[in-house]
Amino acid sequence: MPYIRGEMLHFLRDRSTLLKIPRRWQELYNEGQKVRKQLAESFGRPPKDMEIAEELNVSLQEWQETKLAVQNRMPLSLDATVVHYVDCQITLGEALTCPRTAAQQQQEEERQQLQGAISLLEEKPRMAVEMVFLKELSRKDAAKTIGTSPMTVTRYLQKGVQDLMCMLQPQAVASGS
C-alpha cells in the first residue's frame, strides 16, 4: 500500500499543474468551452465573453477570472522565446529585469555623474570634498594637507557641496527624481 500511494503522489506531483484552481472554476471553464462551441455554431462567429457568461448564468467578472485562472495555471519557461529577431532570439529570462542589477546600475551611473561633477569644482573645494567625503579624512587632517585651517576647509566643503548640488540638480529634475 505505501508504495502504491507513493507512486500515485509522485505521479500527481510530476504530471499535474503547479497551481490548483477551485473545482467550481474547472467545471465552469469546461462548461464554458462547450457553450463557446455551441454559440460559435449558432452565431457563425466567435462569441463574446458577455454572451458566454449570460449563457452560463454567471457574472462577466467570474467568467473572466475563471478563464484567467485556467490560462495561468501552467508555468512559463524562462527559456521561452519572447521576441524573435532575424539574427537573435530574446528569451523570457533575458527580458525580465533583476531589481538588484538595476539598482547597482543606477548607483554606478549616479557615482559617475558625481565624479564628473566633482572634477568640475574649483581646485580647493574639490580637494576638500575629496579628502573629507571620499578619503574620509578629518577636517583637521585635510587642512594640513591643503595648507589651510580647519575652518577654511569647512568653508570649502560648504562651497563644494553647494556647487555640486547646483550641478546635479538639473539632472535630478530631468530624470524625475
Image: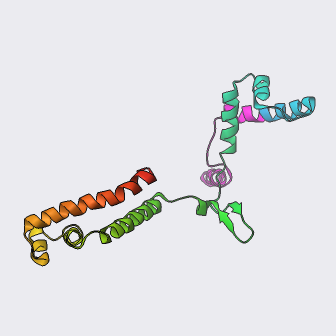
Q: Does 45 sit above or below residue 9?
A: above
Residue found 75% across the figure and 69% down from its top? 86
The image shows a total of numbered marks equal to 0
State left or right for residue 160 relative to residue 99: left
Q: Does 77 sit above or below residue 16?
A: below
Q: Does 18 sit above or below residue 153?
A: above
Instruction: Tell me the quarter of the picture where residue 40 sits.
Output: top right
Q: Nearer the viewer, residue 108 or 45?
A: 108
Q: Position of residue 34 (x, y in %)?
A: 83, 33
Residue 167 falls within the magenta-colored stretch: no
State left or right for residue 63 relative to residue 105: right
Residue found 78% across the figure and 32% down from its top? 32
Q: Position of residue 136 (x, y in %)?
A: 19, 69
Q: Main secondary structure of the magenta part?
A: helix
Q: Nearer the viewer, residue 4 or 61?
A: 61
Residue 6 falls within the magenta-colored stretch: yes
Q: Nearer the viewer, residue 49 or 101?
A: 101
Task: Specify the farthest residue to the front.
Answer: 122
Q: Nearer the viewer, residue 113 or 17?
A: 113
Q: Position of residue 173 (x, y in %)?
A: 41, 51
Colouring mode (rainbow / by chain / secondary structure / one colour): rainbow
Q: Position of residue 97 (x, y in %)?
A: 53, 59
State left or right for residue 13 relative to residue 98: right
State left or right for residue 2 relative to residue 103: right
Q: Which span of residues is magenta-colored? A: 1-30
